[in-house]
Amino acid sequence: MFRGLHDDPRVHLQKVFTEKYDEVVLVKDISFNSMCEHHLLPFQGKAHIAYLPRGKVLGLSKLARLVEVVSHRPQVQERMTETIANLLEEELQAKGVAVVIEATHSCMTIRGVKKPGSLCITSAMKGLFRSNVSSRAEIMNLIYGGRKHLAKISIGQVWQPAASGAASIRAPASATRTLALPASPVRPPEGTIAM
């Protein structure tokens, strides 16, 4: 479980291929298991890693190996996310790096507040994915586009249930974020099926 403490994740980022490809490279749903350093309880989930190459690409399995090494350390999810993004940015000199991690934490589900089914999502955006709103929106759409339970809203927006059972979002003009929301924020009447 802690073998990542002694392994250097950079080893997996050394073998690259020279390519003129300059569009998004994304590997989604890389499963992992890690350990919360505060409670010494496991957290597990999926990592989504993307980068915009600058003349060199990495073998796809190397992204999964990177997650494997980094995840096998006691840590917090936020640091894990940032560590993976920083390693990719430093080693590949990519134009942009995006790392999104979704995980369930035993320290939240089996002790303390005991809320099974809760999901923590962290992200680290570097380069163009941080500075360019459309690049960030593209990568978030590639990661979450097919999932109906997500809604794209802007920072500062307020979700408001309407009397009709629908929902509206009031928003000022600002940068966008993608947040997880229930597919049906308003409970349907008994006997109906929410789509």
Image (cartoon, rainbow, N blue to C red):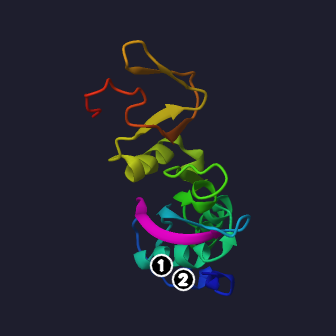
Instruction: Characterize the local packing of mark 2: few (<14), some (14-19) or many (20 or more) Cα atoms within 10 angstroms.
Output: some
Where does label 2 land, which residue? 12
Image quarter hosting the C terminus:
top left
Q: Is residue 53 magenta?
A: no
**In the rendered view, does 89 fall on the left or right side of 47?**
right
Outermost residue, top side: 163
Q: How many marks?
A: 2
Q: Is residue 98 visible?
A: no
Where does label 1 land, which residue? 62
Relative image position of residue 118 (x, y in whole percent): 53, 49
> With respect to residue 58, does 182 lie above or below?
above
Looking at numbered disc 2 in the image, what kind of residue is underneath it? His
- Magenta region: which residues? 23-35
Relative image position of residue 83 (x, y in whole percent): 65, 67
Q: Residue 78 appears in which quarter of the rendering?
A: bottom right
Residue contact at pointers 2 and 1, CB within 8 angstroms = yes
Q: Is residue 115 visible?
A: yes
Image quarter hosting the N terminus:
bottom right
> With respect to residue 142, does 151 lie above or below?
above
Relative image position of residue 168 (x, y in whole percent): 44, 20
Element carrying mark 1? helix
Instruction: Characterize the local packing of mark 1: few (<14), some (14-19) or many (20 or more) Cα atoms within 10 angstroms.
Output: some
